[in-house]
């Protein structure tokens, strides 16, 4: 059916004209830029609130200190130190047995550094006290799920053992000399 000009004009008059905010197209066109603004604000908030902790200010000094770290691992290897332990089921306490191939008295206290691989703010230090010859115990801060780096040292930091644990799946810990040469 062909409409005459007069019929077409009458058809347009009968069809109500909606205001712009009732049409879907302006909203559809504005959705993209609004989504980008929201994503930008969210990204900025995440960047300000959380520090990645991967870049250090004194990287040169830390680079020079790597030889000292290697020497501490070598000293632990010479003394034949190794440690095995268990994290309690709740992950709040640790029990370690330190074994040495050298007949020398073991320290009364040890320190266990617990480090998150990417978030320095989650790192912790646990003081382990000797409960029996070679057996050490201490309270551990709450560990979130994921991989954790463990470093066992004496109080003077003259030697060190290292290892990792994956929470919550792994509760057995083995610490060996780091980088023995």
Image (tube, rainbow, N blue to C red):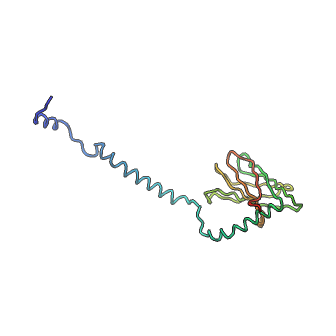
Determine the residue located farthest toward the right in the rendered image: 103
- Name the residue: 71% across, 46% down: 170
**Viewer-proximal residue among 165 and 129:** 165
As drawn, 55 above or below 15: below
Determine the residue located farthest toward the top in the rendered image: 1
Q: Tell me residue 84's x, y (percent).
A: 79, 52
As drawn, 49 above or below 156: above
Q: Pick the quarter of the image with the N terminus.
A: top left
**Viewer-proximal residue among 41 and 158:** 158
As drawn, 9 above or below 83: above
- Name the residue: 62% across, 68% down: 59
Q: Pick the quarter of the image with the C terminus.
A: bottom right
Which quadrant of the view contains residue 105?
bottom right
Q: Tell me residue 111's x, y (percent).
A: 75, 61
Determine the residue located farthest toward the front in the rendered image: 181
Which quadrant of the view contains residue 110?
bottom right
Residue 93 located left or right of residue 8: right
Residue 81 located left or right of residue 68: right
- Name the residue: 77% across, 67% down: 156
Q: Tell me residue 141's x, y (percent).
A: 69, 54
- Name the residue: 74% across, 59% down: 178
Which quadrant of the view contains residue 10?
top left
Count of all numbered marks drawn on residues in the image: 0
**Viewer-proximal residue among 99 and 20:** 99
């Amino acid at each position: 059916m062909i409409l005459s000009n007069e019929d077409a004009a009458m058809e347009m008059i009968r069809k109500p004209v909606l205001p712009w905010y009732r049409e879907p197209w302006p909203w559809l066109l504005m959705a993209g830029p609004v989504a980008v603004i929201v994503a930008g604000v969210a990204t900025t908030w995440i960047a300000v609130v959380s520090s990645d902790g991967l870049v250090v200010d004194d990287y040169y000094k830390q680079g020079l200190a790597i030889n000292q770290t290697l020497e501490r691992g070598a000293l632990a290897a010479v003394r034949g130190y190794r440690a095995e332990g268990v994290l309690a089921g709740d992950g709040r306490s640790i029990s370690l047995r330190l074994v040495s191939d050298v007949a020398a008295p073991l320290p009364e206290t040890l320190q266990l550094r617990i480090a998150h691989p990417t978030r320095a703010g989650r790192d912790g230090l646990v003081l382990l006290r000797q409960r029996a010859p070679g057996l050490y115990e201490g309270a551990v801060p709450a560990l979130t799920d994921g991989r954790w780096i463990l470093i066992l040292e004496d109080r003077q930091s003259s030697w060190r053992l290292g290892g990792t644990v994956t929470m919550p799946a792994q509760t057995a810990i083995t610490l060996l000399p780091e980088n023995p040469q």
